[in-house]
Image (cartoon, grey):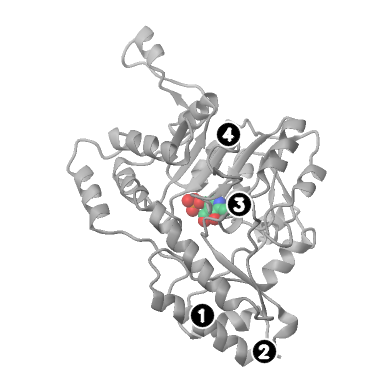
Amino acid sequence: MLPYARHSVDEKDIGAVVEVLRSDWLTTGPTVDRFEEAFAAWVGARHAVVLSSGTAALHAATFAAAVGPGDEAITTALTFAASANCILYQGARPVFADVEPDTLNIEHAQVEAKITANTKAIIPVDYTGQPADLDEIKEIARRHKLVVIEDAAHALGAIYKQRRIGTLADMTVFSAHPVKHITTGEGGIVTTNNPELARRVRMFRNHGITTEARERHGKGRWFYEMVALGYNYRLTDIQCALGLAQLEKLEGWLERRASIANRYNEEFTGMPEVELPVVRPDRTSAWHLYVIRLNLDKLRVGRAEMFDALYAENIGVNVHYIPVPWHPYYRKLGYERGGWPVAEDAYNRLISLPMFAAMSNRDIADVIEAVRKVISAYRL
Ligand SMILES: Cc1ncc(COP(=O)(O)O)c(C=O)c1O
């Protein structure tokens, strides 16, 4: 079975991890600092703070943005639950906006329409690796005095109007889960140019404890104070060693992902049964996912049958995503189906094809052949 995504770990990565295992530090030592510096430099941000997962990073960013009980934050309906759960963790209410029909990224006009006196933040997601409409979203945020937390879990290495993702929003959140562009096993990163936001994220990942050298100096070397309710969201030196080694290969992996996407585009263009991903001309996708939408009126079966047929061909397809407000937990909170027609229609028709840097040319050919075979078997 060809998976839809898979990490790449080589002997150099393993060597880097083993070296840390033999050192004096397993967690929160020099390798955390080195990974943070290297990551910040790679995206061009002043600060990078690593955390135990992308979800923890979103939670810390939402805390840093001072989102709290009684507040609202706006995100997209077509995303992973974590993009909205971070709002709930802070006791605030997620408000879901629908997506653009071409890119499936959050529709900025809807964001503005959903702003109330309680709105504190906007959390756009760079769906599949393509940056959302960041200029428009930032302009809306400026007018309404909101914080923008960009969920770039899919978008490490993506480019928006000639600038790399990582400094365009107030905070940008990345994930280093094994299906993503680089991995630390589990891991997340918040990047920002704002030192105060970086300080708040850092404090939150360490129990809400301040570690300012100045205070320790004045009150004794042992001194620390817990000033907010934080968590243990730290990433280990062991994981950061893997992250550092992975970061060196990122550029090449991004190129490979783009070439796989080009190959799929070439092969599937002109097939009336599928709608291909659309990337706007002013941005470059990091191609975390390659998502097609089926034109169900041209097929004899639905998405479920197409999905199963591809699986039967040993192609590990996936679906990204069930709209977040459809989940039972969200339904219990009062969200109802039908409020996000574009996202909901897309969900009923979409399939993610395998996309990862280590795919061989044979793997790519297998996917193309399976898609052709299944479509010709079911076309009307
Ligand atoms: C859009 C989005 N946001 C956040 C996350 C959470 O990241 P993590 O799995 O590192 O906690 C994911 C993970 O899949 C994601 O796809």
Find out if the beta carbon at label 2 lies less than 8 Å from the nearest ligand 1 atom: no
x and y, in percent, of residue 314 in the image: 45, 82
CB-based contact (under 8 Å), mark 3 and mark 4? no
Q: Which mark is residue 196?
A: none
Q: Give the number of the mark in front: 1 or 3.
A: 3
Q: Earlier in the sequence, mark 1 or mark 2?
A: 1
Mark 1 belongs to which amino acid? Answer: Ile
Displayed quadrant of residue 210? top left
* Amino acid residing under circle 2: Arg
Front position among marks 1 and 2: 1
Q: Left or right: 303 with respect to 317?
A: right
Residue 98 horizontal/vertical position (percent):
75, 55
Q: How far, Cα to Cα, is label 1 from label 3? A: 26 Å
Q: Secondary structure at mark 2?
A: loop
Check disc 1: other Cα within 10 Å, few if <14, some if 14-19, many if 20+. some
Which residue lies under the disc numbered 4? Answer: 63
Quadrant the N terminus occupies: bottom left
Q: Which residue is at 67% across, 67% downward?
A: 347
Kindly identify the residue that appears in the image at 70 percent across and 57 percent down.
Answer: 325
Q: Are marks 3 and 2 in contact (CB under 8 Å)?
A: no
Closest to the camera, between mark 4 and mark 1, is: 1
In the picture of the structure, the residue carrying the numbered disc 1 is 368
Check disc 3 and report the residue beneath it.
Answer: 283
Q: Is residue 70 visible?
A: no
Q: Point out the tag, 3 or 2, that comes first from the N-terminus.
A: 3
Earlier sequence position, callout 4 versus callout 1: 4
Q: Residues within 10 Å of mark 4 (few under 14, many from 20)?
A: many
Mark 2, Cα crowd under 10 Å, few <14 / some 14-19 / many 20+, is: some
Residue linked to disc 2: 379
Alpha carbons under labels 4 and 1: distance apart: 44 Å
> Which of the two marks, 3 or 4, is nearer to us in this view?
3
Q: Are marks 1 and 2 in contact (CB under 8 Å)?
A: no
